[in-house]
Image (tube, helix red, strand yellow):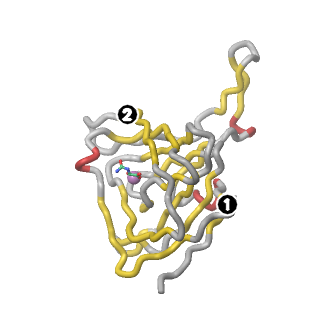
Amino acid sequence: MSEFLEILPLTKTSFAPYGEVIEADPSKMRLINNGTTERFHALGQPVVVGAPERLIFNIFRGQPRQFPYSVGMMERHPFGSQSFMPLSGKPFLVGVSDDEGGRPGKPKIFLARADQGVNYFANAWHHPLMALGAVSDFLVVDRDNTAANLEEFFFETPYSIAEPDL
Ligand SMILES: NC(=O)N[C@@H](O)C(=O)O
Ligand code: NI
């Protein structure tokens, strides 16, 4: 019987060890364009390790996950950060793990609102995109040449996630 993982709200504090939360934080806001635009400044830092690879913009179109969902693996990108910002007005799930001697520990699952994105730090264990409820698009900024930038770990016993209460 696999262990069910609790779903927590996504907050800057809870997510801090794994990356940055991209959201319109009033403390980061400055008025620009003659007061007609609110700029929420420097919400996260895209990172490439090991030039000459480039940071690129992508769109990921994710199929909604079905529940109960089996979390059988985690992955990480040693040579760059990876950010996901919802474009379809839907919430999504974020899964991360601490590193425990080169392997991911028990995953932590966060529910990201439709107005929240995340930027995973380089080498942060995370689960691949988990869209919710409908096919959803995400703006993704990460390092080009992903082939050399992906490490996966498969759990002997998968964890489970119950249908989130949206
Ligand atoms: N492999 C890929 O491009 N996607 C994953 O990295 C992911 O985090 O969804
Ligand atoms: Ni990834």
Q: Position of residue 149 (x, y in %)?
A: 28, 51
Residue under the point 48% across and 86% down? 1
Q: Quadrant location of residue 59? A: top left
Residue 92: which disc? none
Residue under the point 43% across and 46% down? 82
Residue 9: which disc? 1
Between 25 and 157, the residue placed more toward the observer is 157
Residue under the point 25% across and 35% down? 52
Residue under the point 36% across and 47% down? 80
Earlier residue among tags 2 and 1: 1
The local secondary structure at tag 2 comes to strand
Q: Amino acid at mark 2?
A: Ile
Q: How far is mark 2 from mark 1, CA to CA? A: 29 Å
Identify residue for label 2: 56
In this rendering, position of residue 101 left or right of residue 159:
left
- Within 10 Å of disc 2 (Cα), the crowding (few <14, some 14-19, many 20+) is few
The quarter of the image holding the C terminus is: bottom right
Q: For disc 1, does the CB lie below 8 Å from ligand 1?
A: no
Q: Position of residue 139 (x, y in %)?
A: 48, 37
Q: Position of residue 33 (x, y in %)?
A: 69, 14
Between 121 and 128, the residue placed more toward the observer is 128
Q: Is residue 164 above or below residue 156?
A: above
Q: For disc 2, does the CB lie below 8 Å from ligand 1?
A: no
